[in-house]
């Protein structure tokens, strides 16, 4: 069939495209290369800022609600919204029952309201993002804060930040469900609400954005970053309006660490990285223990509350939020023996309570444990070698942030968070070294973090690394410009079948662009279409069932892959954006797979380098 072979066009010989192809082209590449935001992002940003205002108000409301429950439970039924600590109670041994009664209420709310209120909220939000298109039930917007207020107000050893973050995320998700949004936009609103909740609690807007990126968004894109950042800024403004702009845990009169001190802080972070993995394992060990109890899970928070109350009876400072404990640890005003006692019993109380499935956060307990361990290690280093220049307060700060970095794997958020709550720039360098070493050790020792272990047990995979989409970095022209074997729309099926059976060049292809009598693209026909046709006398034009779909040569391979998936096709003709009437190539699913070979090669040593390494006994060889 020489006439068929002659219809092959080279990469320099384009063909006009039929007018019917224009709509498919426009739909195939909606945005021009380099476009990262559009008017829709402006709309979502506006909605995110409104969510932030609401989340900021919810944070203030929840804080006062916790104060109210604390006053009622530990201070004689006093109806007051003023800040109060459970440690100042006068209940005597009766204090043992208070956390248990709170746990009983939580169990009833979880069973008859929503089981999702159990835990600290962030893993549950991550699960909704990964498996349910960021749809959080509307009832969570009020059940979570109420349950957290009861749990913490009755002595639960948690911080308010986790429930506030979870409530802000639920609020953003709810707004996204009420409005006409995509799943991606709903995820952005969820993350914006969560970041707003954290910023409104600690006055830490930058770390709130980083936390949203590292734990909820699973991406770094302008379309999601802009709304989240604006939401965090607005929520922080709401906080300033209520409580001012002062640092949550001010740290003054510290000096720039010398090299020896910096190395000590890095080593301290590594030790705390080990501790973070042990603490995470202990929490889930306790949770597994409750799973084996022969009673319904509704009763677990009450049973855990008995143990929390018992610990609180002997060490009252383990009860409740404990932000005052963190402040004393960071400022260096708490005695070393008191730090050891507090952190030891706080860990026992928190692990039991969280493992029982009650409602509460993890950030404040992790900060307490990390700060205490950092204080002890810093004091030990100073006692052994005073010349190192270790500041116990900086050691406590590094310990706090390193514990959170190791347990949550939110490295950047941990570093910036510790800076924002202290406003102490001198601590940034020790924080960078200590948190990074903790993060490294934790990654080596644990597959999952304290945030992802729970959902991993449910079969949900949460990625810990986010990299740019490799296909998004390569343009179609890099592998889609080639000679195109085309067929005429006027050819009969029998004619083409005979050509396919001849084994001529091009007959092994699986699909062929079809040109009309004027040389314009009319559609694409596959070998399956040709084999499936019952009447061999019909023309190829009669086999075409849809308008042709094409891709621009300056579009990315990700655009091409998305287009193929959406249209359920395996190949796309390639056209020029400057001259969309010209067909200059074709790209197939095999091309997309082949493009990944370069990505795999970038992660492998070349053969010569590997031989040199073996010859040198494994040592790095110079090129």
Image (spheres, rainbow, N blue to C red):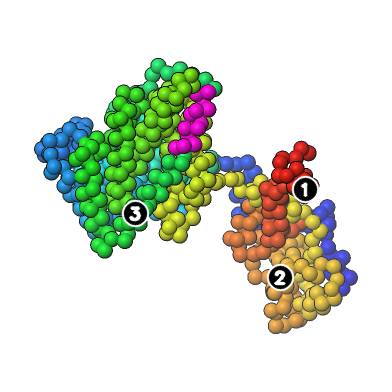
| Residue 578 part of the magenta-drawn span | no
Identity of the residue furthest to the left in this view = 76
Identify the residue at image location x=79%, y=65%.
Answer: 486
Identify the residue at image location x=49%, y=36%.
Answer: 270
| Residue 265 part of the magenta-drawn span | yes
**Does dot 3 land on a helix, a strand or a loop?**
helix
Q: Position of residue 243 (x, y in %)?
A: 29, 27
Residue behind mark 2? 526
Residue behind mark 3? 287
Q: Position of residue 518 (x, y in %)?
A: 79, 63
Identify the residue at image location x=32%, y=56%.
Answer: 289
Q: Judge left or right: residue 96 versus residue 451.
A: left
In the image, which residues are magenta? 260-272
Q: Marks 2 and 1: in contact by CB < 8 Å?
A: no
Query: Camera-side residue: 619 or 462?
Result: 619
Q: Earlier in the sequence, mark 3 or mark 2?
A: 3
Residue behind mark 1? 611
**Does dot 2 land on a helix, a strand or a loop?**
strand
Number of other residues with Cα within 10 Å of mark 2, as a class: few under 14, some 14 to 19, many 20 or more? some
């Amino acid at each position: 069939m020489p006439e068929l072979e002659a219809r092959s066009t080279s990469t320099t010989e384009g063909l006009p495209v039929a007018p019917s192809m224009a709509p498919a082209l426009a739909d195939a590449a909606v945005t021009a290369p380099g476009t990262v935001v559009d008017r829709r992002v402006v709309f979502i940003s506006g909605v995110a800022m409104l969510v932030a205002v609401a989340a900021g108000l919810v944070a203030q409301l929840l804080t006062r609600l916790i104060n109210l429950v604390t006053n009622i439970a530990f201070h004689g039924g006093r109806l007051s919204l003023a800040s109060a600590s459970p440690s100042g109670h006068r209940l005597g041994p009766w204090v043992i029952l208070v956390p248990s009664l709170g746990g009983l209420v939580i169990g009833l709310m979880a069973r008859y309201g929503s089981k999702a209120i159990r835990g600290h909220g962030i893993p549950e939000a991550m699960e909704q993002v990964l498996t349910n298109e960021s749809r959080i039930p509307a009832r969570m917007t009020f059940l979570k804060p109420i349950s957290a207020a009861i749990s913490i107000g009755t002595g639960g050893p948690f911080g308010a930040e986790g429930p506030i973050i979870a409530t802000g995320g639920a609020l953003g998700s709810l707004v996204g469900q009420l409005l006409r949004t995509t799943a991606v936009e709903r995820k952005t609103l969820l993350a914006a609400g969560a970041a707003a909740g954290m910023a409104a609690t600690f006055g830490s807007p930058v770390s709130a954005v980083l936390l949203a990126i590292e734990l909820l968004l699973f991406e770094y894109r302008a379309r999601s970053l802009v709304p989240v950042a604006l939401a965090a800024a607005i929520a922080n403004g709401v906080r300033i309006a209520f409580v001012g702009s002062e640092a949550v845990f001010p740290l003054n009169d510290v000096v720039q660490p010398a090299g020896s001190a910096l190395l000590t802080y890095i080593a301290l972070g590594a030790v705390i990285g080990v501790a973070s993995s042990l603490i995470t394992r202990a929490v889930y060990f306790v949770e597994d223990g409750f799973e084996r109890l022969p009673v319904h899970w509704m009763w677990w928070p009450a049973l855990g509350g008995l143990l929390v109350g018992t610990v609180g009876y002997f060490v009252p400072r383990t009860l409740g939020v404990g932000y005052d404990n963190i402040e004393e640890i960071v400022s260096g005003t708490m005695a070393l023996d008191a730090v050891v006692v507090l952190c030891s019993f706080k860990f026992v109380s928190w692990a039991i309570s969280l493992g029982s499935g009650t409602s509460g956060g993890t950030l404040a307990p992790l900060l307490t444990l990390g700060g205490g361990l950092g204080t002890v290690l810093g004091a030990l280093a100073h006692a052994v070698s005073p010349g190192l220049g270790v500041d116990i307060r900086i050691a406590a700060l590094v310990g706090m942030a390193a514990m959170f970095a190791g347990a949550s794997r939110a490295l950047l958020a941990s570093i910036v968070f510790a800076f924002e709550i202290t406003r102490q720039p001198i601590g940034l360098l020790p924080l960078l070294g200590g948190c990074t070493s903790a993060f490294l050790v934790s990654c080596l020792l644990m597959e999952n973090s304290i945030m992802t272990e729970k959902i991993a047990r449910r079969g949900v995979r949460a990625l810990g690394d986010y990299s740019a989409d490799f296909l998004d970095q390569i343009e179609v022209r890099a592998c889609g410009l080639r000679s195109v074997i085309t067929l005429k729309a006027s050819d009969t099926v029998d004619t083409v079948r005979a050509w396919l059976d001849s084994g001529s060049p091009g007959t092994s292809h699986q699909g062929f662009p079809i040109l009309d009598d004027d040389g314009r693209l009319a559609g694409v026909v596959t070998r399956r279409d040709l084999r499936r046709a019952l009447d061999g006398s019909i023309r190829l034009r009669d086999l075409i069932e849809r308008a042709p779909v094409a891709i621009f040569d300056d579009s990315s391979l990700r655009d091409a892959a998305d287009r193929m998936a959406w249209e359920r096709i395996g190949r796309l003709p390639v056209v020029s954006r400057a001259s969309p009437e010209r067909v200059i190539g074709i790209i197939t699913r095999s091309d997309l797979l082949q493009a990944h070979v370069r990505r795999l090669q970038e992660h492998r040593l070349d053969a010569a380098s590997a031989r040199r390494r073996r010859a040198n006994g494994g040592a790095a060889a110079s090129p």
